[in-house]
Amino acid sequence: MELTRVIRRPIITEKTNEQLSQNVYTFEVDWAANKFQIKEAVEFIFNVKVLRVNTSKIDKKPKRLGRFAGFKNRYKKAVVLLAEGNTINYYPQEEANAKQEAAKAEAKAAKKEAAKKEVSEKESAVAEKIAAKKAAKKENK
């Protein structure tokens, strides 16, 4: 089985979000995939070191939509424990947004610093003019 077809999607719930702090990630995987294939796929796709993989098969569940009855699909769930220091980013857009916000904050700070420098230069120029006027006044007396 191709490694890119083993992992279907991450499972994002309150429970799995709490487990992220313990380096435990949960994925929906192909029904026929085994633990070795899942470990290999996660390591290949995300460039991380996997310590342990636990799997469970979730059966189909009855589902109703109005008067129509059907079933939610069955799937296989893999709970993956990563080595210390490895992480997987489920939300790459948030990372990009954080970088953009950091760049904006840095640019704003640089602009503020330049404005302070300009004000201090103006103040020193004004102070020199005042000192020159006072010196001229003393000479006239």
Image (cartoon, helix red, strand yellow):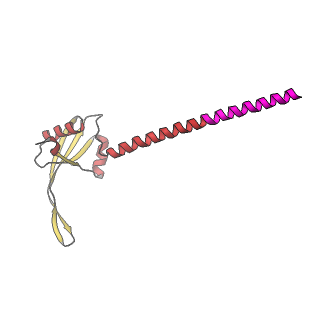
Residue 29 vs residue 124, the one in the foreground: 124
Residue 2 vs residue 123, the one in the foreground: 123
The percent coordinates of residue 23 (x first, y second) are 28, 40
**What kind of secondary structure does the magenta stretch mostly adopt?**
helix
Image quarter of the C terminus: top right
The vertical placement of 11 against 106, above or below, is below
Span shown in magenta:
117-141
The percent coordinates of residue 53 (x first, y second) are 18, 41
Image quarter of the N terminus: top left
Q: Quadrant of residue 121?
A: top right
Q: Residue at x 36, y 45 (%)?
A: 94
Residue 51 visible in the picture: no
Q: Is residue 61 left or right of residue 98?
A: left
Q: Residue at x 60, y 36 (%)?
A: 116
Q: Is residue 86 magenta?
A: no
Residue 88 visible in the picture: yes
Q: Residue at x 15, y 58 (%)?
A: 73
The vertical placement of 96 against 71, above or below, is above
Q: Residue at x 69, y 32 (%)?
A: 125
The percent coordinates of residue 104 (x first, y second) are 46, 42
Given the current orientation, which residue lies at the most extreme right position? 141
